[in-house]
Image (cartoon, rainbow, N blue to C red):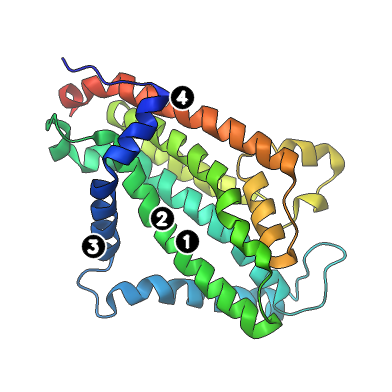
C-alpha cells in the first residue's frame, strides 16, 4: 500500500506541484456551477448585488439599525458593515459545508493512484475565493458610490484573510476524511454552520457584548478575521498585530494537523467507498 507523506513540507510541495491541476479544476468548478443557466456566470455577480440591496433595505429602512451604540445615522452603514462580515462568513461556510462530501463526490478519483486527492479542498477553496472576490467587487463599488474612494487599507485584505484560509483548509482536510467514514458528518456540519452564524459577530459588533462574553466570543475562530476585515474595509483601521500574529500561528498549526490527518487516513478511502 502506498504511503503518503504527512509532513508540513509535503503540504507546500503538493500545492506547488499541482498548481496547474488546481487552477484547471477551479475554473471547471466555477463555470460548471452556472452551466446551462441563461445568465451563466453573471449569476455570481447578480447574487451579491441582490443581497446587498436586500440588506440595505431591511436594515436601514425597516429596522433603522445602527452599528453599535455610537453608530452613525447613515442608512447604508449597517448594510455595508453587515455585508463585509457576511462575505467572510460565506467564504468559511461554503468551504466547510462541502468539505464532508468532497471525497464521496469524487469517488472516481479515489482508486486512481496518480491523482492527488489532497488538492480537492484547495479546489473548493479556490471556487469560494472567486465568489468572495466578486462580492468584494460589489462592496467596493457600493462604497465608492455612497462614500467615495475606499480606504487604501483594503489592499491588506490578503494579509488578514490568510489565517482564515489556512484554518479553513485544515478543517476541510479533516472533514473530507471524516466524511468518508462517518456519513452523518455532513448533516452535523450543516446544523453547526447555522448555529455559528448567530454566535459570530456578523449582525452585531463584538464590543456590544458584556465584557465577560467578549473574551468568550473571541474563542470563535471567525470573530478575529471578521472584526479585522470590517476594520480594514469600512473604517480603514489597521488590524492588531498581536491578534493577527496569534491568528496566523494558530491557523498554520491547525492546517498542518488537518493535512496530516487526511494523509494518514486516506489509505482506507478505497475500501470504504
Mark 3 vs 2: CB contact within 8 A = no
Graded by Cα atoms within 10 Å as few (under 14), some (14 to 19) or many (20 or more), the crowding at tag 3 reads: few
Mark 2 vs 1: CB contact within 8 A = yes
Residue 65, by quadrant, is: bottom right
Could you tell whether 92 is left or right of 180 in the image?
Answer: right
Mark 2 lies on residue: 128
Residue drawn 73% across the image and 80% down it: 75
Residue 3, by quadrant, is: top left
- The first of marks 3 and 1 along the sequence is 3
- Residue 141 appears at what percent x and percent y? 56, 79
Residue 29, by quadrant, is: bottom left
Q: Quadrant of the C terminus?
A: top left
Inter-mark Cα distance, 4 to 1:
26 Å
Is residue 101 visible in the rendered image? The answer is no
Mark 4 lies on residue: 257
Inter-mark Cα distance, 4 to 2:
22 Å
Task: Say which element carries label 4.
Answer: helix
Graded by Cα atoms within 10 Å as few (under 14), some (14 to 19) or many (20 or more), the crowding at tag 1 reads: many
- Residue 32 appears at what percent x and percent y? 23, 62
Mark 1 lies on residue: 132
Amino acid at each position: 500500500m502506498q504511503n503518503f507523506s504527512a509532513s508540513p513540507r509535503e503540504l507546500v510541495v503538493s500545492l506547488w506541484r499541482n498548481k496547474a491541476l488546481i487552477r484547471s479544476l477551479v475554473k471547471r468548478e466555477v463555470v460548471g456551477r452556472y452551466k446551462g443557466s441563461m445568465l451563466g456566470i453573471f449569476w455570481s455577480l447578480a447574487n451579491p448585488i441582490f443581497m446587498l440591496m436586500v440588506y440595505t433595505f431591511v436594515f436601514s429602512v425597516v429596522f433603522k439599525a445602527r452599528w453599535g451604540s455610537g453608530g452613525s445615522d447613515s442608512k447604508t452603514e449597517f448594510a455595508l458593515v453587515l455585508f463585509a462580515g457576511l462575505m467572510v462568513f460565506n467564504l468559511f461556510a461554503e468551504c466547510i459545508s462541502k468539505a464532508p462530501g468532497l471525497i464521496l463526490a469524487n469517488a472516481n478519483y479515489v482508486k486512481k493512484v496518480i491523482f492527488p486527492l489532497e488538492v480537492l479542498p484547495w479546489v473548493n477553496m479556490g471556487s469560494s475565493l472567486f465568489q468572495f472576490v466578486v462580492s468584494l467587487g460589489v462592496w467596493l463599488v457600493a462604497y465608492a458610490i455612497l462614500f467615495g474612494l475606499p480606504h487604501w487599507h483594503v489592499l491588506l485584505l490578503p494579509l488578514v484573510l490568510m489565517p482564515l484560509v489556512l484554518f479553513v483548509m485544515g478543517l476541510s482536510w479533516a472533514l473530507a476524511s471524516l466524511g468518508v467514514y462517518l456519513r452523518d458528518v455532513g448533516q452535523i456540519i450543516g446544523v453547526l454552520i447555522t448555529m455559528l452564524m448567530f454566535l459570530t459577530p456578523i449582525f452585531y459588533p463584538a464590543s456590544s457584548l458584556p465584557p465577560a462574553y467578549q473574551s468568550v466570543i473571541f474563542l470563535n475562530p471567525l470573530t478575529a478575521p471578521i472584526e479585522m476585515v470590517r476594520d480594514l474595509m469600512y473604517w480603514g483601521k489597521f488590524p492588531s498585530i498581536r491578534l493577527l500574529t496569534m491568528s496566523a500561528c494558530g491557523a498554520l498549526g491547525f492546517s498542518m494537523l488537518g493535512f496530516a490527518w487526511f494523509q494518514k487516513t486516506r489509505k482506507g478511502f478505497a475500501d470504504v467507498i
